[in-house]
Image (cartoon, helix red, strand yellow):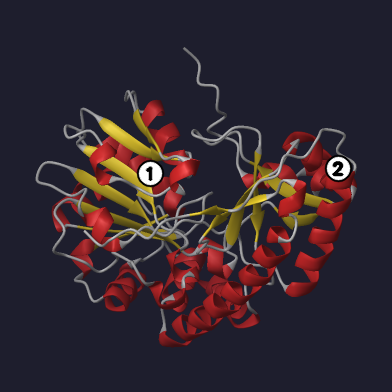
């Protein structure tokens, strides 16, 4: 039976072709990136393109950044490649994906011939994880933190409750460097059995077109995944970018950007909350560089927003969500103000009655 959700739909589809001129609130890559210094680093690598890529320096730099031996690091062509490697190389019988979340892990598992179980988190619970909801016999569990598209940051103690002997626990931390202090991060932990952490350098640094990320896992897991990779999977420019993006200067810049994103997100949420009387609901607390909102007549509102020059991400392609949800990227004050004005206009044009609702607020979860 075909799945009702288009697992291959991503935010970039909103701004291709006829959407190229829209204000982009659909893609979660930080605006104004890559910075000039990083562009210069990448440009400087072009003189070395005649040689085959050598990932040793970048791999060592990532290992130092997380305080790990190099045997625990695998560089990949973005986190998407890592999902494919996990699906194809690991011998698992009952993989489970916690939704709503980034859909590529499930798509990769399906493409590799796996039957994938789902744990659907509920809006009524603020999309928070109950570890007991994951089947005991699941031998591969995938979850994002902070989660795309809900912007929920799960406590590290809750996630580690999912770990046990014989199970691979995959935590996608693609947006963790956008969280001030990277609190609740599991990257660098070696005491959690079966833990695999994925990181992406494309979101914070604007490198979606370059494709660079990495896996942090036990040496035996890294070895299995590495054998499944083609030769020279990460290009020389991407390797240079990876090394640069984990250097102290870059980490300091990323930390500053995370605080700026948090301030911009707070302003955006305040503006969205002001539209509660028009039926707008915001999933809170939000911790990622995007927010998830529920809007009455969302498909029509989304179409009107496009007509007003703004692209947002539809939510119905995520398992666990329907077409009433939209994801909005966090941008600067001026861009957010323009979007809120357009959203107000779009809502006013909606002919359906707007039911009174409130924001979606999560209850604190005790560390486990």
Q: Can residue 52 be seen in this view?
A: yes
How packed mark 2 is, by other alpha carbons closer than 10 Å (few <14, some 14-19, many 20 or more), is many
* Towards the viewer: 155 or 211: 155
Q: How many labels does the image show?
A: 2
Q: Which residue lies furthest to the front in this view?
A: 356
Q: Which residue is drawn at 72% across and 49% down?
A: 312
Q: Please, is residue 327 above or below residue 288 in the view?
A: above
Which of label 1 and label 2 is nearer to you?
2
Q: Residue 328 carries which label?
A: none
Q: Where is residue 329 in the image (x, y as percent from the top left)?
A: 65, 58
Is residue 19 rendered to the left or right of residue 365?
right
Picture quadrant of residue 331: bottom right
From the viewer's side, name the closer residue of 26 and 240.
26
Tell me: residue 307, above or below residue 106.
Answer: below
The disc, 1 or 2, on the residue closer to the chain's N-terminal end is: 1
Left or right, 204 with reference to 105: right
327 or 171: nearer the eye? 327
Residue at figure coordinates x 60%, y 65% from the top left: 206
Q: Mark 2 points at which residue?
A: 304
**Residue 268 lies in what quarter of the image?**
bottom right
Residue lying at the far top of the rendered structure: 1
Q: Locate the C terminus by quadrant.
A: bottom left
Secondary structure beneath dot 2 equals helix
Asked if one can make out residue 33 in the rendered structure from this viewpoint, the answer is no
Secondary element under disc 1, as helix, strand or loop, is helix
Q: Can you identify the residue that label 1 sits on? A: 83
Q: Relative to 48, say whether 164 is above or below.
A: above
Residue 211 x, y percent position in the rendering: 51, 56
Label 1 Cα crowd, 10 Å radius (few <14 / some 14-19 / many 20+):
many
What is the C-alpha distance between the residues marked 1 and 2? 35 Å
């Amino acid at each position: 039976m075909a799945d009702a959700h288009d697992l291959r739909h991503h935010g970039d589809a909103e701004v291709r072709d006829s959407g190229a001129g829209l204000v982009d609130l659909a893609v979660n890559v930080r605006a104004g990136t890559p910075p000039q210094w990083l562009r210069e680093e990448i440009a400087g690598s072009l003189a070395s393109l005649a040689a085959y890529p050598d990932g040793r320096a970048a791999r060592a730099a990532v290992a130092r950044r997380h305080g790990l031996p190099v045997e625990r690091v695998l560089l990949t062509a973005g986190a998407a490649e890592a999902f494919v490697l996990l699906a194809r190389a690991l011998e698992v019988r009952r993989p489970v994906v916690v939704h709503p979340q980034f859909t590529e892990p499930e798509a990769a598992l399906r493409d590799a011939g796996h039957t994938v179980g789902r744990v659907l988190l509920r809006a009524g619970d603020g999309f928070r994880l109950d570890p007991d909801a994951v089947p005991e016999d699941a031998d591969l569990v995938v979850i994002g933190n902070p989660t795309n598209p809900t912007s929920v940051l799960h406590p590290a103690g809750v996630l580690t409750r999912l770990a046990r002997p014989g199970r691979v626990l995959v935590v996608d931390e693609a947006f963790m460097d956008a969280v001030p202090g990277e609190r609740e991060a599991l990257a660098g932990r070696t005491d959690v059995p079966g833990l695999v952490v994925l990181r992406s350098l494309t979101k914070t640094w604007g490198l979606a077109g370059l494709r660079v990320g990495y896996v942090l896992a036990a040496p035996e897991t890294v070895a299995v995944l590495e054998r499944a990779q083609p030769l020279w999977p990460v290009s020389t420019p991407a390797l240079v970018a990876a090394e640069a993006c984990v250097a102290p200067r870059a980490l300091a810049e990323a930390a500053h950007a995370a605080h700026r994103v948090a301030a911009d997100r707070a302003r955006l949420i305040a503006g969205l909350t002001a539209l509660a009387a028009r039926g707008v609901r915001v999933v809170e607390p939000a911790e990622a560089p995007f927010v998830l909102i529920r809007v009455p007549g969302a498909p029509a509102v989304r179409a009107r927003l496009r007509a007003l020059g703004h692209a947002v991400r539809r939510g119905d392609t995520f398992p666990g969500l329907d077409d009433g949800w939209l994801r909005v990227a966090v941008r600067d004050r001026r861009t957010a103000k323009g979007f809120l004005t357009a959203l107000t206009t779009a809502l006013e044009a909606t002919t359906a009655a707007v039911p009174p609702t409130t924001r979606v607020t999560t209850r604190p979860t005790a560390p486990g």
